[in-house]
Amino acid sequence: MADSEKRLNTMINKLRENNCRITPQRLAILKVLAASEGHPSVEKIYEQVKPTFPTTSLATVYKNVSTLRDLGEVLELGFSHESSRYDGNNPHPHPHLVCTGCKKIIDPDLESLKVVTRELTEETGFKILNHRLDFFGLCPACQEGAQA
Ligand SMILES: [Zn+2]
Ligand SMILES: [Zn+2]
C-alpha cells in the first residue's frame, strides 16, 4: 500500500472514532492532505477539491483541516506573513526546507537531527517533545531561474 493510502486510512479511522462522517467531499479533502504534495495551504487544497465538488467552500476546507490538526493527524506549519501550510503525510514534528522563490516545502532526510536532539537533552536535561525547524532558501530550479 502506498504511503499516502496508509495515511488516508489512518485519517479516516481517526475521524470515525471521533464520530465524524466521511462524506465524499470530506474524502476528497483527506486525499489531498494524505499526499500533501509540497505541503499545501488551505487555498491550494480548496483549488484541488473545487473542480469535483463545486459547492465546497474555503471555510469547509479550513474546518476539515483544523479538525484533523486538532486530532494530531495533520501538522500545521505557521508563517507570520503567509498562509499556514499543512502536512498530512507526516503529522509528526520534522524539519522542513522552504523555497522562498516558488514557495514549495519539502521534507529533508536529516539523520543528524537525532544527534542534535540527544546533545540538547544531555546538555540541558530537557525531555524534548517537539521542535520547529525550518530552513529557508532557493531550490535548484529557482536558482537556475535566478541566473537566467
Ligand atoms: Zn523554488
Ligand atoms: Zn513535512
Image (cartoon, rainbow, N blue to C red):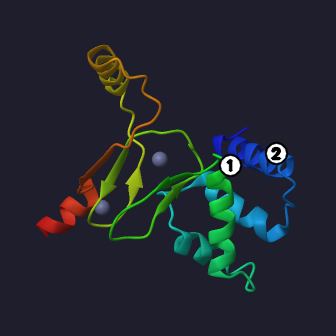
Classify 29 as above or below 128: below
Query: Does 15 sit left or right of 34 as displayed?
Result: right
Kindly identify the residue that appears in the image at 37 percent across and 70 percent down.
Answer: 82
For residue 115, side relative to residue 4 (left or right): left
Task: Specify the label residue 129 is tagged with.
Answer: none
The label shown at residue 71 is 1
Q: CA separation, marks 2 and 1?
A: 11 Å
Quadrant (top left/top right/bottom left/bottom right) for the N terminus: top right
Which numbered disc, 2 or 1, marks the residue that appears first in the sequence? 2
Q: Quadrant of residue 26?
A: bottom right
The image shows a total of numbered marks equal to 2
Q: Which image quarter: residue 45?
A: bottom right
Q: Amino acid at mark 1?
A: Leu
Residue 76: x and y, percent? 51, 55
Q: Relative to 52, say whether 6 is above or below.
A: above
Q: Quadrant of residue 94?
A: top left
State the image coordinates of residue 11 (x, y, percent, origin top left).
73, 48
x then y, percent, for residue 109: 39, 34
Report the residue marked by disc 2.
13
Q: Secondary structure at mark 2?
A: helix
Q: Is mark 1 within 8 Å of ligand 2?
A: no
Where is residue 3 shown, x and y percent of the image? 64, 40
Amino acid type at mark 2: Asn
Q: Residue at x 83, y 68 (%)?
A: 24
